[in-house]
Amino acid sequence: MPYLAKILIYPVKSLDGVEVENARVLASGALQYDREFAIFDEVPNLVNGKRHAKIHLLRASYASSLGTSQFELSNRTISLQIPGSDSKQFHLDDEKQALEMTLSDFFGFAVTLEQNSLTGFPDDKSSTGPTVISTASLIEVASWFPGLSVDEVRRRMRANIEIAGVPAFWEDQLFTQQDDVVSFRVGDVYFFGVNPCQRCIVPTRDSQLGEAYTNFQKIFAKQRQATLPEWVASSRFNHFYKLSVNTRLSASEAGKILQIGAEVEILPQSNLGLRH
C-alpha cells in the first residue's frame, strides 16, 4: 500500500531543507514554511541555484521549539555556515539586516531576504502544492549515476513529499493529458496532480559543492526515456528531463495536516467533484 514516507520543507528557497513528521497545508495549497523566504538581488531577481551555483556552498539549519517532529519557525532563527567560517545564527526579524549583509558579502552583490507566508516562492505559480516523488524513483535515478547516493539525488531533486511502498515512477500516474488533473489523497488531504516537473540545471550539480556531474542531463534523459512506464501520459514528455509531480490543492484543504505514514490513494475520476 502506498504511504507517505518523508516530508521535506525548505524554509529559504534554494537552501537546505528540513525533514519533518508532519506539515500543515496553507490556503494556497503550499506547505507551511516551505520556501517562505527567498533571496533577491537588486533587480529584483531570485538568487537561486539556477543562476548562482555558489549558493550550494551555504549550509543552513533552523531552530524549532518543537523539535524535528513538528517543525515551526517560532524561534525565527536561522543558522548559516559559509565556507571557511563558523556557523552564525540570525534572528529572521531582529537581525534580518545583518543576515542580508552576510549574504551580500558571500555573493559579492547586494541581496535582500523577502518573505511570503501565504504562498511561499514556488517555481510553478499555477501549481503551488507540494511536489511529489517516490522513494523507488530516487533509488532508480541514483543507480544511473555511479558515485551518487540516494540521499544526494534526494537533495538534488528537492521534492516535498516522498511516497514509499510503490515501484519506481509510480508518481507518473498522478498526471494525465494536458489540461486535465488526477485526484489523489494523502491521508485526509486531497490533491490534484497536474504535470511532471521539468528539471533545471540544479540537479546536475553536487548539492553541497556546486560541482557539475559530467553529462548528467544527457544521461538522465536517456535513462528516463528507456524506463518510462508504458501507461504514462507520454504527451507530457516533449523531453525526458522531468521527474516528480507538481500539484495543487483546493482551499478546502487549508489547515489539514500531512502526517508521515498516511495512506496514499489515487481516486477514481468520478470522485473529482465530490471533494472539490
Image (spheres, rainbow, N blue to C red):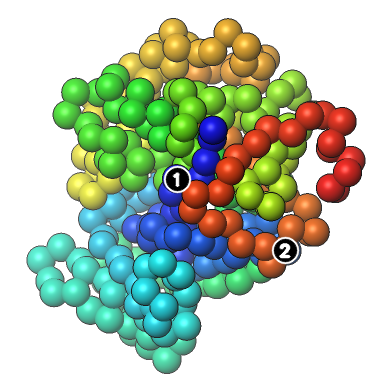
Label 1, secondary structure: give it: strand
The spot of residue 160 in percent (x, y) is 49, 49
Quarter location, residue 174: top right
Q: Nearer the viewer, residue 198 or 9?
A: 9
The spot of residue 92 in percent (x, y) is 42, 82
Amino acid under disc 2: Ala
Q: Which mark is residue 5?
A: 1
Taking 8 as reference, is 258 left or right?
right
Q: Taking 138 as reference, is 162 above or below it?
A: below
Q: Residue at x 62, y 12 (%)?
A: 231
Quarter location, residue 82: bottom left
Amino acid under disc 1: Ala
Q: Taking 194 as reference, is 240 above or below it?
A: above
Q: Residue at x 79, y 59 (%)?
A: 251
Q: In the image as oriented, which residue stretches furthest toward the left? A: 84
Disc nearest the viewer among 2 and 1: 1
- In space, the residues marked 2 and 1 are separated at their CA atoms by 21 Å
Q: Which mark is residue 156?
A: none
Is residue 74 among the parts visible in the rendering?
yes
Label 2, secondary structure: give it: loop
Q: How many numbered discs? A: 2
Q: Residue at x 61, y 71 (%)?
A: 117
Q: Quadrant of the N terminus?
A: top right
Taking 126 as reference, is 49 left or right?
left
Residue pointed to by mark 2 = 254
